[in-house]
Image (cartoon, rainbow, N blue to C red):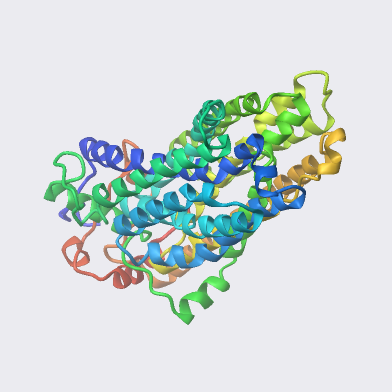
Amino acid sequence: MSSSAPAAPSLTRGLRVQRDLLLMPLLILGYGMQFWDKAVLGSAALFQIIPDLGLQGKRFSTASSIFYLGYLAGAPPMAFLAGRMRLNVFLGASIAAWGAVLMLTPAVHNWQGMYAQRFFLGFIEASVSPGFVAVTRKWYTREEQTVRLGVWYSATGLFSIVSGLTNFGLGQTNTSLRPWMILFLVPGAFTIVLGLLFLVLLPPSPSEAPVLRLRGYNVFTDERRNALVHAVRTNLTGEGKASLSAHEVRKALLDPKMWLFFLIATAIYVCNGAVTVFGPQIVKLVWGATSARALALQAPGGAMTAVAIYICIVIARRVRNTRILLLVLSCLPVIAGAAMIWRGNWQTRTPYVGYLLLPIFGAPFVMLLAVASANVVGPTQQAIATAVIFVGYCCGNFASGYILIPAEAPAHYPTTWKIVIGVMCATIGLALLLLAVLVRENKVYAAEQQAAGPVKGAAHDDAASATEGYETREKNDADTDSQLSAAAWEEKHRLSFRNQY
């Protein structure tokens, strides 16, 4: 590398702080509201929505699962649109629309209407996760993405506390409306406001201006904007627009990583039924709590989710190539928790402590998102990978609605806990297989690069290239690279790309 080569623009501390203060609060609020909105049905079950809408028996499970059928139908097109549309418009409109659908829930008078409402809610909410992943890829380097994915995803834990305590209070209100109706109206109204904030405050990309410009908040100087654009472009994971074609689909189908992403996401989210869907009912039935107190007893589980995610992302940021190791290790507390509930003495607090460990399943999912975000090249393959993961997420969640067998209530649902243990063990096995695939690909890349010779100006990914934890790169032909198209850039630097695991 020539010593006279111009250095790539660096990400200063001030730039990183401005970027985080712009994006992280919006993404945390958005993902937290998504969790609250889709989980509110479980809380409403404690406040007479089941008899009011005729959701007895398997109808309640079906109402819960139909949300994920809608999500499943929406995930592929939404992931593709997130790679094509201006993200502020895409996310702002989607978030406001899902808030409106949620607020219409009190207008439902029977189980058929509830099925329809849940399907459309799931279809619209399928836009959020792919959209947030797209934002993270557009604004952050590969090394930064794990932390930011974890930060906004941890909102599921934080908002399980907020929503549980808020629903506790809303359930005590005395109005002309049924208490469960209030549980849908309040978060729905907040969600609509949040959608408008995304529309006007979020810049579509680092190189574009927002609708409402607030200097020092969402408006960047030319120097800072250029630094952001360059940093993300050297990722090979954030530049360009998705363009679906038969070639891209075939390429994804032949990539074993895509299949493993799907299977791991499915296995992880089978656990969700024991926590989100049936959690309040389980706590009420097993521990004899009142409806409102059952919601409060779930709040510490949200804290466990957030803490586990924070621990994982800090380690992943500080210790190179530990994402899959952390994915595996974070499955172990979930297994331990299910075993404590299944085999524990119900005259003690052991099962409750075990129950609080179950929400940690959010941590391995964050590590999965981080692995996929860092190791898929090109905007179209990124969109496909995101769709694949969230299709698996939907499949797991759909199945999770049926892992609780009501007849097993006197025995404390032993089948449920056996299933949780089984899918977590499967997750561990699949993660180790994914690690083997990534290591093998790196060996192939290295062999191809050696055969082709040095690539002039190629981006590289050595530990030595990091400065204060953030990567800064130098290129011999920086001026030429700045004029390349996204496809040309990808082709030029493909051989120097290395998987991070």
In the rendered image, residue 342, in percent from the top left (x then y), is placed at 81, 33
The tally of labels here is: 0
Which residue appears farthest toward the top when viewing the image? Answer: 348
Residue at horizontal 31%, vertical 50%? Answer: 139
Of residues 66 and 180, which is closer to you in this image?
180
Residue at horizontal 44%, vertical 79%? Answer: 245
In the rendered image, residue 352, in percent from the top left (x then y), is placed at 72, 25
The answer to whether residue 495 shows anywhere in this view is: yes
Left or right side of 120 for 485: left
Which residue appears farthest toward the bottom when viewing the image? Answer: 246
Q: Is residue 477 above or below residue 400?
A: below
The answer to whether residue 32 shows anywhere in this view is: no
Which residue appears farthest toward the front when viewing the image? Answer: 176
Q: Is residue 173 above or below residue 180?
A: above
In the rendered image, residue 209, in percent from the top left (x then y), is placed at 18, 54
Left or right side of 372 for 138: left
Q: Quadrant of residue 449?
A: bottom left
Q: Quadrant of the N terminus?
A: bottom left
Residue at horizontal 16%, vertical 39%? Answer: 216
In the rendered image, residue 264, in percent from the top left (x then y), is placed at 63, 54
Residue at horizontal 38%, vertical 43%? Answer: 27
Left or right side of 90 for 360: right
Of residues 397 and 337, which is closer to you in this image?
397
